Amino acid sequence: MRIITSILTLIASLMLAACNNTPDPVALNTVKTGTPALWKVSGTTAGQQGVAYMFGTIHILPDDVQWRTPVLENAIADSDTLVIEVLGLEDTRNAAKIFSRLAVSPGQEKLDARIKPSLRDDLDRIIDSANIPERALNRMETWAAALSLASAQTKGLGLKSSGGVEKKLSAQFEKAGKPIEALETIELQLGYFDKLPEEQQRQMLTSVVEDSSNAQQAFEKLFNAWMTGNVEEIVTLSDAGILTDPKTREYLLVARNLNWAEQLDKRLQNPGTSMIAVGAAHLVGPDAVQATLAKRGYKIEKIQ
C-alpha cells in the first residue's frame, strides 16, 4: 500500500483534517541530504520542439531534509511551466466535497464485513487510532475507507501534506510568475479508485490493515529510496502490495502513465521547457512515463 498511499495522500487527508490535529513528528530514520532522480526529455525530430524535465516526487516530507540540488535548481530556472498531477487541493472545502461525493454510497456493508475475520481486530485498532467515526467509514466505498485509514497512519507519523514537494515547487513557480498546470483533475484522480472493482478495493483495504504495523518503516524505505535516487528500490517498492494485482496496476498506474505520456507528447510538439513533477512511482520501471516517450522517439537522459 505504500506506493498507493503516496499517490493520493493529500486528497485522502482532506476529510481527516477536521477529525484530529497532526501529532508531533516521530523520530524517523531518514536520509537528511539527497539527490532525487531527475530526467531530461528532448526531441529528436523537427516535430518534437519542446523540452521537459521529469522529477519524481514524494507527496509528504519530514521538515529537516535537503532534497534540492544545483542540478534541480538549474532545471527549475530553465523551465517556463510547472506541470503537477492535480490542481485545486488548496481549496480544501471543494476538494473534500468532491471526495465525499465519490466516496460515500448508500447500502454499503459494515467495513469489518469487507475484510477477512482474522484481520478484524487489527482493523478495529486502526480505526480507534485514526480517530475517524466508524459510522463514517461504514458509509464509504471500500477504496475511500482504505485511503482514509492509510492517510491517518501517515498523519500518525506527524507528517503534513503541506510540506510536500509539489507544494514547495508550486510556491516557487508562483513566486517567479510562472504558470502551473495539471495532468488530472481531482475528480479524475479519485475516479481511478472509484472505478476499481470491489474485489480490488477490498484488497486495498486488506493491504492497509496488514501494513499498519510497519507504516513507519515503509515510509522510511520509500523516502530514503527517493532521496538517494535509488530507482531500482522504488521499482521494488512499487511492485509490492496492491500493485501486484494486474487489474489494479492497470487502473492506478499503467493507464494513468499512458494518458500522461500522451499529454506530454502533445506538449513537447511545441517550443518551451516544462518541469513535470509527479509521484516517483510513475517515473520508474517498464511502465514509466518516459518509457512511452522513448518509444515515440524522444531522447531520455537521467541527469541526476
Image (tube, rainbow, N blue to C red):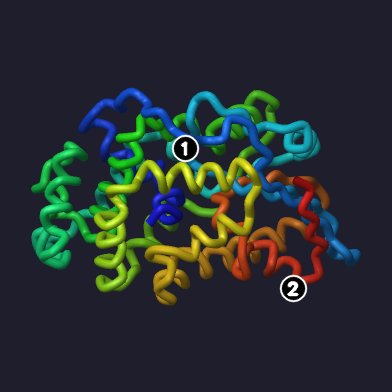
Which label number is shown at residue 60?
A: 1
Residue count near mark 2 (Cα–Cα under 10 Å), binned few <14, some 14–19, many ≥20: few
- Towards the viewer: 257 or 187: 257
Residue drawn at 50 percent across, 48 percent down: 222
Assess disc 1: are there few (<14), some (14-19) or many (≥20) residues with their C-alpha within 10 Å of its C-alpha.
Answer: many
In the picture provided, is 104 more to the left or to the right than 182? left
Q: Residue at x 22, y 59 (%)?
A: 141
Task: Where is residue 108? Give x, y as percent.
Answer: 12, 63
Q: Quick one: label 2 or label 1, which is nearer the N terminus?
A: 1
- Between the C-alphas of marks 2 and 1, the distance is 32 Å
> Going by the picture, which residue comes out furthest to the bottom?
246
Q: Nearer the viewer, residue 154 or 89?
A: 154
Q: Are marks 2 and 1 in contact (CB under 8 Å)?
A: no
* x then y, percent, for residue 27: 40, 28
**Front: mark 2 or 1:** 1
Q: Amino acid at mark 1?
A: Ile
Check disc 1 and report its element: helix, strand or loop.
loop
Between 1 and 180, the residue placed more toward the observer is 1
- Where is residue 115 shown, x and y percent of the image? 17, 64
Q: Does any portion of residue 182 appear in the rendered image?
A: no
Q: Residue at x 28, y 41 (%)?
A: 152
> Where residue 295 is drawn, which disc sits there?
2
Q: Position of residue 126 (x, y in %)?
A: 19, 46
Q: Is residue 25 left or right of residue 19?
A: right
Q: Secondary structure at mark 2?
A: helix
Q: Quadrant of the N terminus?
A: bottom left
Q: Residue at x 40, y 73 (%)?
A: 245
Nearer to me, 288 or 174: 288
Q: Amino acid at mark 2?
A: Lys
